[in-house]
Amino acid sequence: MAVGYERQVVAVTNDELATWTATPVGNGPEQVGGPCPRCQHPTTAAIQASPVIVAAFRDDAVKNVTSLTQLIDCSCQEPHAGRPAGITGGCGGEWLISIADEPTGLKVGAGDIALLGAAKAFNEATANELSVVRGLAKNWVQGVAALLGLFSLAGLVFTATAVSTLSSGYQIGFAALAATALAAAALGTYLAYRAAFGWPKRTDVNDDVALRKFFSDNGKRAAEAAKYLKCGVAATFLSIAALGAAILVLWFGTPASPPSPLVTITTTDGSEPCGNLLPAGSDGSIRVLTAQGQVVTVIPSTVMALTTVDMCPS
């Protein structure tokens, strides 16, 4: 009786897979084949993530590899009523097989049905690996662009001219707050993007123990993403607070004392001391700090002229 097309998981036994074979390439399985347990037509399947499996079976350092469960889809070329137009083969059945490395060679047997969810998740992960990595790269480009935009905005707000008008203490405080704001913003952006898009890494799945761990790690990855998001939000608020404090320092900080004017004093004795004008002495004398670091005292009654200059003669 002809079998119509229907997507369903078929429970199989070792006897039903007795004629199945694994075709090795080097020391690892590359392709398995045999009659479909649902429609009995010949079918073959390429092993998912074969580089991982091949490495596991041919690595002499791996001594405890006994089997690896795989989810197989029927790919027969016989006609099946109801098969969707976009699907070119198969009866819709899928089942689990276990490839065992035995002394007599590779043997195909029935897989553990408890690993169905893990095998499906593994197949989806390996099938979408390239697109996931490319998608992560594109999203991280946006994250880098956001960071560059943040630094550009900070450069517009915190001009060197505005900061230079502050006293030294406020300049140090402003620098510390601005550095904290930028660092926290960078950290918050990184953590938020890490939570949203993850981080690509290679996971070796070379036996059923590793396959179970791969499946159970999905929940852990979700918990880690939530942790990254919370930390990213906290870092973002820290950045905003530090940025606001830096702006307040810029607006209300004590300005630096203006430098004393540079003057040349012409005296009745013909001398012309030149330097920065200092506060008057206790006796009312005029004091000038020369470029050589000397303080010259001039009696007011001897002053013929006092002229501000841009620079003193050498």
Image: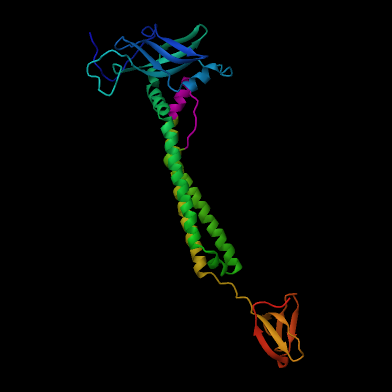
Is residue 201 highlighted in magenta? Answer: yes
Question: Furthest residue to the right?
Answer: 269
Q: Nearer the viewer, residue 223 or 268?
A: 268
Q: Would residue 64 be found to the left or right of residue 90 on screen?
A: right
Vertical position of residue 167 compared to residue 71: above or below? below
Q: Would residue 1 be found to the left or right of residue 12 on screen?
A: left
Question: Furthest residue to the front?
Answer: 313
Vertical position of residue 125 compared to residue 234: above or below? above
Q: Nearer the viewer, residue 32 or 213?
A: 32
Q: Where does the image place residue 137, in percent across and percent down from the top left?
A: 45, 39
Residue drawn where x is 59% and y is 69% of the image: 167
Q: Where does the image place residue 258, in percent across and percent down from the top left?
A: 60, 75
User: Which colour scheme appears in the figure?
Assistant: rainbow
Q: Is residue 54 visible?
A: yes
Residue drawn where x is 54% and y is 16% of the image: 58
Quadrant where the image shows the N terminus = top left
Quadrant where the image shows the C terminus = bottom right
Q: Is residue 111 visible?
A: no
Q: Where does the image place residue 125, in percent across and percent down from the top left?
A: 41, 28
Q: Where does the image place residue 63, in percent across and percent down from the top left?
A: 56, 16
Q: Would residue 312 be found to the left or right of residue 183 on screen?
A: right
Residue 257: name its quadrant: bottom right
Task: Please state the extent of the stretch shown in magenta in the rendering.
Answer: 199-216
Residue 127: name its quadrant: top left
Q: Tally the marks.
A: 0
